């Protein structure tokens, strides 16, 4: 069996996920295409050695339907022999895509495989793809479906995180992201998006609000109280009968931002890297996914991380850096406590609360962010993980080479 | 034909008046179905008949729904389990009326219905199969599908025709809550086509519609038909319907399979053409029939309640009504049961949530614990145990009341508990709860929980008897 190495990672800056966002006028295919071209151009590889491109996309309908990965591959002028497949593991799709790419390399199926993702939430909004889970009474009743915001508030309630706790975390994310951008920590991997003339249209994460403070967040009303009253709190209490009532603490300011973006990570075996004189930046040491309780939905990260670490014969103490997608502040606070992590080691460069979460792309983005941070801080091992809709978690451990 | 009077008018329009002999209200039983089948056959095959108007021959209204006394035979889990043969037989038998109505709306002759007074349940479903509906705009006119309120669902096309007329979201409250609407609301919702002030005008309007070339095609049988407001995967409906699922789950807590199945009928049926949709509805109708809730709710909430109300009316005011004292006993038993849970370290939150899970919409108040220790977690798997610990002690108290003779009629114990104490309606009452499980199994569970079982109940179990031994339909008026 081969080893899987990360040779390069790129991502677009994230545009606001609304019609006035900077990337709204750029098609999803174009975003994905530009990232595939960037990987090719930065590394100088012959794409004939890229066996497959796996792109995550959480809303694969409309212009993101019909296997956008393959279409982007064609559009990027890759070798005709490079295949492409789009996958959907909701919020973890980008990381799952990298895990699948790594698995293909390890299994000997692929020399190079690219994992990444694309999501234009301004052009193909959340919910555009429908799906049975919440709407088919059979599945909704059986799984005690509740929307993700209810899950986040339920975590805060059960774990005792107050409105101040989650808001403070959000302020920290904004500060860290602003500092990281200010110090150029993202310069290596962020590739500006080009418009139809080939001119840069966006070169930074425009969703950030560095001036955010406890006062500005305190003014926001909880986003999920109404749906809780409509019945979803009742559903949550049925599943978690020890809870008196759900404390609704999350709002747009302490939840992941809705944005547009794309990402791609070049993964390959040792042999193919040598062919191009490319230095492997990190080894993908292990990957895992797990199912978790669907009603609270967002508790997968600790479960999958422990599963992966155990399989690797490691503990959390062996990990120098954690990147956990900031779906909601309580998700991160819970993980921090469950894994007993020094807060300085968790999302040190901010996260999706500040910079946004382009659903299918994020997983590969934070993998790249972790890699850059390991190199910048001369650390060895990182664990990257995300919580996922319908109760799942996906994780990857990388080790600098 | 025993239940239908048919005349032909000068234009060749058949006027069929439904008038079930010996009943104050028209209800749909086997005879009515057979007579309608003959009527359909005759109208279809006689070239001289140009159309059909269906009306009522009774002043009490159009039709109040299915004959529940007849239906009661089919209710409850089948003895010997739901074998494939039983499922197929029930599917065939219970789908008869639905298939007949489908034939009525597709056999190629225009059908109009005149609604004066109540059109409920199967009665409304009959009218929905007509191509034109005119209602008399008077307070006595009420249109509704109340099947859900007694643990059943509209099995003759109601879950399929109503959403196709009103849109999915507008149909849900009518289907789930069973509250009837007025003639005016029915017009607004698209359930009827026209209103008239006087009954005579209604018949004229129906005949005129036929005579002036009313088409014998339902909207859903026309090419390019789109469900008003969109199907369940249209983005706006997807969101609203998902919310409706959540609202229902929070309210019904999985205790009312009829309600869950109504949602399934609407969701699944709205995605396919009418013939397939009706088959889906019949399947869920059969599944609902086979639930203990259907048997218990029809019996207690309809048959028993109706019968006892009649008796009470005839008897006049009764100073020796045993129900108030009995309700007191239930309240005490509930307080003791909740106190036992709190003593056992269960949090007051869990007790309240447990009561909701058991089916109390507004859980009776709980005395807070005196213990300083942190409550022990019930966990997501603990719900069933909580339900049992809240429901079974009250069932035992009801058994005691029968045993010591304070209540002599099990129907009074059940109706009294549901109406007087808010005992969860899905059970049909505490004694129906015991009967539904089987006394032996109930006693075994109580013994395991360390609850005190009255001797009378043990004796009843030993003789393999039950509180409602005998044919429940014998209780029908």
Image (cartoon, coloured by chain):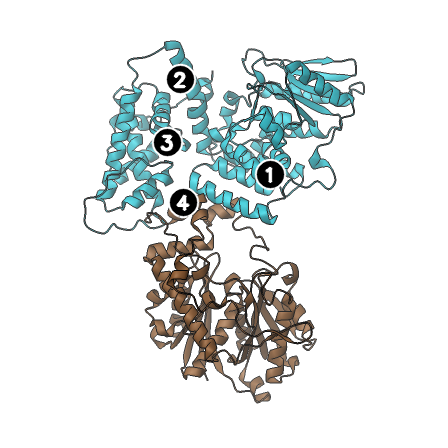
What is the C-alpha distance between the residues marked 3 and 1?
A: 29 Å
Task: Indicate the chain on which mark 3 is placed.
Answer: B
Disc 4 on helix, strand or loop? Answer: helix
Query: Residue drawn 53% across and 69% down?
Result: A206
Marks 4/2 in contact by CB < 8 Å: the verdict is no
Q: Secondary structure at mark 1?
A: helix
Can you see residue A153?
yes
Q: Is residue B12 left or right of residue A350?
A: right
The answer to whether residue A296 of the structure is visible from this angle is no
- Can you tell which mark lies on residue B433? 3
The single residue placed furthest to the bottom in the displayed view is A277
- To which residue does mark 1 refer? B280
Q: Is residue A343 above or below residue B89?
A: below
The foreground one among B113 and B181 is B181
Q: Colour of chain A?
A: brown
Query: Which corner quadrant of the image does residue A266 belong to?
Result: bottom right
**Label 2 vs 3, first from the N-terminus:** 2
- The local secondary structure at tag 3 comes to helix
Q: Which residue is mark 2?
A: B308
Instruction: Same chain for labels 4 and 3? Say yes or no.
Output: no
Same chain? Circles 2 and 3: yes
Say if labels 2 and 1 share a chain.
yes
Mark 2 vs 1: CB contact within 8 A: no
Q: Nearer the viewer, residue A223 or B351?
A: A223
Q: Which chain is cyan?
A: B
The lab-note entry on whether marks 3 and 1 share a chain reads: yes
Mark 4, residue position: A234
Q: Are marks 2 and 3 in contact (CB under 8 Å)?
A: no
Residue A157 position in % (x across, y down) = 35, 54
Q: Chain of mark 4?
A: A
């Amino acid at each position: 069996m081969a080893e899987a190495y990360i040779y390069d990672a790129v991502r677009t800056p994230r545009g606001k996920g609304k019609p006035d966002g900077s990337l709204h006028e750029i098609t999803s295919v174009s975003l994905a295409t530009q990232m595939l071209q960037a990987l090719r151009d930065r590394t100088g590889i012959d794409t004939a050695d890229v066996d497959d491109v796996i792109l995550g996309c959480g809303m694969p309908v409309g212009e993101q339907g019909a296997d956008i990965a393959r279409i982007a591959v064609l559009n990027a002028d890759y070798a005709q022999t490079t295949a492409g497949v789009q996958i959907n593991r909701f919020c973890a799709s980008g990381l799952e895509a990298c895990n699948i790419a790594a698995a293909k390399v390890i299994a000997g199926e692929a020399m190079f495989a690219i994992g990444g993702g694309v999501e234009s939430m301004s052009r193909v909004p959340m919910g555009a793809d429908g799906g049975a889970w919440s709407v088919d009474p059979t599945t909704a009743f059986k799984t005690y479906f509740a929307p993700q915001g209810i899950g986040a508030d339920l975590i805060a309630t059960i774990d005792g995180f107050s409105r101040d706790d989650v808001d403070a975390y959000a302020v920290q994310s904004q500060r860290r992201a602003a500092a990281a951008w200010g110090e150029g920590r993202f310069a290596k991997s962020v590739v500006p998006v080009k418009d139809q003339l080939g001119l840069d249209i966006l070169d930074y994460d425009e969703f950030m609000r560095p001036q955010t403070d406890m006062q500005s967040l305190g003014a926001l009303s909880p986003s999920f109280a109404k749906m809780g009253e409509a019945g979803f709190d009742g559903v949550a209490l049925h599943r978690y009968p020890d809870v008196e009532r759900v404390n609704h603490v999350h709002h747009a300011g302490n939840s992941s931002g809705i944005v547009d973006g794309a990402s791609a990570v070049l993964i390959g075996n040792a042999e193919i890297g040598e062919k191009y004189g490319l230095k492997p930046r990190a080894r993908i040491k292990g990957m895992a996914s797990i199912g978790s309780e669907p009603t609270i939905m967002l508790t997968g990260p600790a479960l999958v991380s422990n599963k992966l670490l155990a399989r690797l014969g490691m503990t959390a103490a062996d990990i120098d850096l954690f990147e956990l997608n900031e779906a909601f502040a309580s998700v991160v606070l819970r993980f921090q406590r469950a894994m007993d992590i020094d807060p300085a080691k968790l999302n040190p460069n901010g996260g999706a609360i500040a910079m946004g979460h382009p659903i299918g792309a994020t997983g590969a983005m934070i993998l790249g962010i972790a890699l850059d941070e390991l190199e910048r801080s001369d650390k060895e091992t990182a664990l990257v993980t995300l919580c996922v809709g319908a109760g799942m978690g996906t994780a990857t451990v990388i080790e600098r080479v | 034909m025993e239940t239908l009077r048919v005349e032909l008018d000068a234009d060749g329009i058949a006027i069929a008046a439904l008038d079930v002999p010996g009943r104050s209200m028209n209800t749909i039983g086997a005879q009515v179905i057979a007579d309608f089948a003959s009527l359909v056959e005759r109208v279809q095959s006689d070239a001289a008949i140009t159309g059909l108007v269906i009306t009522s021959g009774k002043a009490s209204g159009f039709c109040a729904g299915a004959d529940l006394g007849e239906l009661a035979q089919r209710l409850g889990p089948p003895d010997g389990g739901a074998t494939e043969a039983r499922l197929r037989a029930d599917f065939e038998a219970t789908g008869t009326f639905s298939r007949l109505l489908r034939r009525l709306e597709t056999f190629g002759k225009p059908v109009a219905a005149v609604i004066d007074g109540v059109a409920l349940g199967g009665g409304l479903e009959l009218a929905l199969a007509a191509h034109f509906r005119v209602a008399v705009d008077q307070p006595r006119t009420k249109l509704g599908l109340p099947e859900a309120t007694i643990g059943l669902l509209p099995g003759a096309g109601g879950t399929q025709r109503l959403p196709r007329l009103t849109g999915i979201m507008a149909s849900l409250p009518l289907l789930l809550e069973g509250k009837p609407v007025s003639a005016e609301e029915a017009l607004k919702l698209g359930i009827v086509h026209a209103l008239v002030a006087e009954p005579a005008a209604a018949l004229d309007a129906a005949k005129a519609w036929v005579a002036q070339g009313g088409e014998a095609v339902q909207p859903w049988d026309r090419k390019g038909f789109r469900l008003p407001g969109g199907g369940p995967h249209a983005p706006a409906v997807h969101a609203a319907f998902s919310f409706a699922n959540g609202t229902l789950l929070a309210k019904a807590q999985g205790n009312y399979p009829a309600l869950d199945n109504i949602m399934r009928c609407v969701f699944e049926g709205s995605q396919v053409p009418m013939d397939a949709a009706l088959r889906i509805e019949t399947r869920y109708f059969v599944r609902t029939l086979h639930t203990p809730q259907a048997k218990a709710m029809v019996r207690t909430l309809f048959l028993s309640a109706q019968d006892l109300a009649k008796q009470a009316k005839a008897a006049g005011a009764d100073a020796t009504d045993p129900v108030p004292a009995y309700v007191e006993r239930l309240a005490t038993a509930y307080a003791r049961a909740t106190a036992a849970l709190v003593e056992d370290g269960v949090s007051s939150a869990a007790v309240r949530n447990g009561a909701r899970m058991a089916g109390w919409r507004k859980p009776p108040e709980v005395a807070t614990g005196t213990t300083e220790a942190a409550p022990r977690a019930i966990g997501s798997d603990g719900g069933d145990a909580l339900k049992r610990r809240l429901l079974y002690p009250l069932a035992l108290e009801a058994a005691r009341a029968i045993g010591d003779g304070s209540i002599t009629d099990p129907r009074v114990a059940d109706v009294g508990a549901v109406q007087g104490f808010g005992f969860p309606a899905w059970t049909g009452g505490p004694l129906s709860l015991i009967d539904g499980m089987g006394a032996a199994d109930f006693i075994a569970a109580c013994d395991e929980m360390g609850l005190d079982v009255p001797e009378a109940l043990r004796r009843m179990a030993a003789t393999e008897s039950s509180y409602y031994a005998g044919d429940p339909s014998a209780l029908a008026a």
